Amino acid sequence: MDAFYASVEQRDYPEYRGKPLAVGYPEARGVVAAASYEARRYGVRSAMPSKTALRKCPNIIFVPPRFDVYKGVSCQIMDIFLEYTPLVEPLSLDEAFLDVTENLKGIPSATLIAREIKQRIREETALTASAGVSYNKFLAKVASDYRKPDGLYVIRPEDAERFVESLEVERFFGVGKVTAGKMHHLGIHTGADLKRLDEERLVRYFGKAGHAYYENAHGIDNREVNSNRIRKSVGAENTFDTDIETSARLTSELHRIALRVWDRIEEDKFYGRTVTLKIKYMDFEIITRRKTLASPIADFDVFWNTSKEMLTHIETSEKKIRLMGLTISHNDDGQLPPGGIQLRIKFKD
């Protein structure tokens, strides 16, 4: 979807339309969860500190997130997807892969399916989606971001090699700022540059990710669309307005986080056995503590006591804490319901 959270807010509140808007909180340590396209023109992006967003765009409007609403819209769009194919792999609330090689409506072209789904999303939700159509996940993902917003881009097999060679390495999956900087230092700026290196060298430079970079540079991605993806964890975290150093305050904040996580556990019926406590100190050092129980945790008191016990092993005497998070994982048989919506469609035209 296009600027999903922000677009839902602008849909529901006409006074926000056409204005730079960020979903999140403007506090000193707030973070932008989503930015409207009007805000993006100023350089505001998701995951950006709120104070940076305010510096780039002083007139930006901050609105608190409404995740229940976003999840409801996500499910609404998922229902549309499932009318075309059961092979839907949700990646998050706002993106998914669809394999429409064989579709339920017998439509002969994946491009026609993408156009029809985009139109239905617009008519039924008043939102826009961008679609990428190609023969594997890597190319479909890149295509889905290529003509945003409200875009539709098709990469056909006969065009793939030329397209990938012209692609900036920043657009390759898994290439962030640090990896891109390392690639640039090595003289790698495009897919063509990447393609000139053999797989062994790429693995030597970038570890296991080098295998994927090699295959993607040659237009290869053999991953299937998995409609049975299982969520591996459920969690929540909080960046504090001011750094915390007292055990009593930390315990109080941990309890709030534990309640949020437990609400998600109950909602999704995700009962794991491993609890992980994450701590970020004032100097940005991150540590984790983890405990695995013999059976899935189905009682809040057990979850809370386990979390609280791990907190007692955290050092607070020398450094204050700026962030704390809790995650539960190692779920034996639970599965979260699908909820993705960005059109990244695998096809055979």
Image (cartoon, rainbow, N blue to C red):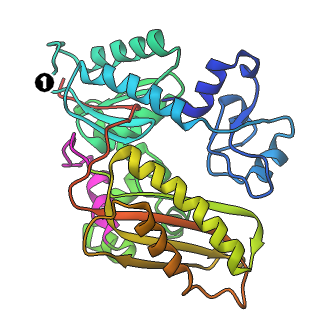
Q: Is residue 220 left or right of residue 154?
A: left
On-image quarter of the C terminus: top left
Give the residue at x 63% y 19%: 12
Does the magenta segment cover residue 218? yes
Q: Is residue 88 above or below residue 310?
A: above
Residue sitting nearer the eye, 214 or 295: 295
Residue sitting nearer the eye, 190 or 170: 170
Outermost residue toward the right in this view: 58
**Residue 287 appears in which quarter of the rendering?**
bottom right
Outermost residue toward the top in this view: 123
Does the magenta segment cover residue 109? no
Residue sitting nearer the eye, 251 or 299: 299
Residue sitting nearer the eye, 272 or 255: 255
Q: Position of residue 249 (x, y in %)?
A: 71, 72
Q: Is residue 242 left or right of residue 151?
A: right
Q: Amino acid at mark 1?
A: Glu
Q: Position of residue 18 (x, y in %)?
A: 73, 20
**Residue 44 appears in which quarter of the rendering?**
top right
Badge 1 marks a residue whose secondary structure is loop
Q: Position of residue 202 (x, y in %)?
A: 33, 69
Give the residue at x 53% y 64%: 184
User: Label 1: how many residues lie within 10 Å, few (<14), some (14-19) or many (20+)?
Assistant: some
From the image, tell me which residue sits under label 1: 102
* Magenta-drawn segment: 208-229
Whether residue 163 is visible to the viewer of this picture, yes or no, is no
Q: Position of residue 74 (x, y in %)?
A: 43, 29
Whether residue 316 is visible to the viewer of this picture, yes or no, is yes
Give the residue at x 46% y 24%: 129
Q: Is residue 35 left or right of residue 233?
A: right
Q: Is residue 329 above or below residue 250?
A: above
